[in-house]
């Protein structure tokens, strides 16, 4: 099954508009994302076109934004395909994944943030 089809299923499941990320758009990540750590928190902020808006963090993130890095979405697909499934959810969506638990919701305050 393609990443596009599972993303569409995810959006349908949460009754959200399908808003895919282009492979070359940037995703902001913390330490632990590439290493496969959980739990993972994801949030999609309104962003300029070169950015996806997604910020993905693990418990390794200490709140210091200078420790975050930006990577192309295509690398998230390669390294963490289980996270890429959620990344066609539109601005304002959040998810928490940890072990067997999954929590996805819309956060109006995030959606209302200015670029």
Image: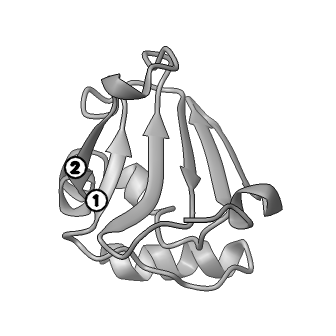
Q: What is the x, y in percent for residue 67?
A: 32, 23
- For disc 2, the marked residue is 71
- For disc 1, the marked residue is 26
- Left/right placement of residue 33 relative to residue 95 reads left
Crowding at mark 2 (Cα within 10 Å: few <14, some 14-19, many 20+): some
> Which residue shows up at 34% across the image and 31% down it?
68
Depth check: 51 or 23 in front?
A: 51
- Left/right placement of residue 35 relative to residue 87 reads left
Tell me if label 2 and label 1 are in contact, CB under 8 Å: yes
Q: Which mark is residue 60?
A: none
Q: In which quarter of the view is residue 49 placed?
A: bottom left
- Which coloring applies here? one colour
Q: What is the x, y in percent for residue 98?
A: 58, 31
Depth check: 98 or 28 in front?
A: 28
Q: What is the x, y in percent for residue 45?
A: 57, 59
- Left/right placement of residue 10 relative to residue 112 reads left
Q: Residue furthest right?
A: 108
> Which residue shows up at 56% across the image and 67% down it?
46
Up-down relation of residue 40 to residue 75 (above or below): above
Q: What is the x, y in percent for residue 60?
A: 43, 15
> Which residue shows up at 27% across the image and 52% down it?
76
Instruction: Looking at the image, tell me whether mark 2 or mark 1 is earlier in sequence order.
Output: 1
> Which residue shows up at 26% across the image and 60% down it?
73
Q: Is residue 4 visible?
A: yes
Position of the N terminus, as image quadrant, is bottom left
Q: Is residue 32 visible?
A: no
């Amino acid at each position: 099954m393609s990443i596009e089809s599972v993303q569409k299923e995810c959006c349908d499941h949460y009754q959200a508009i399908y808003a895919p990320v282009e492979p070359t758009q940037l995703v902001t990540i913390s330490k632990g994302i590439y290493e496969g750590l959980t739990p993972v928190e994801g949030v999609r902020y309104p962003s300029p076109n070169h950015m996806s808006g997604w910020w993905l963090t693990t418990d390794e993130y200490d709140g210091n934004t200078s420790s975050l890095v930006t990577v192309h979405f295509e690398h998230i697909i390669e390294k963490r395909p289980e996270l890429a499934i959620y990344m066609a959810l539109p601005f304002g969506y959040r998810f928490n994944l940890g072990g067997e638990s999954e929590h996805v919701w819309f956060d109006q305050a995030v959606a209302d943030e200015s670029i």
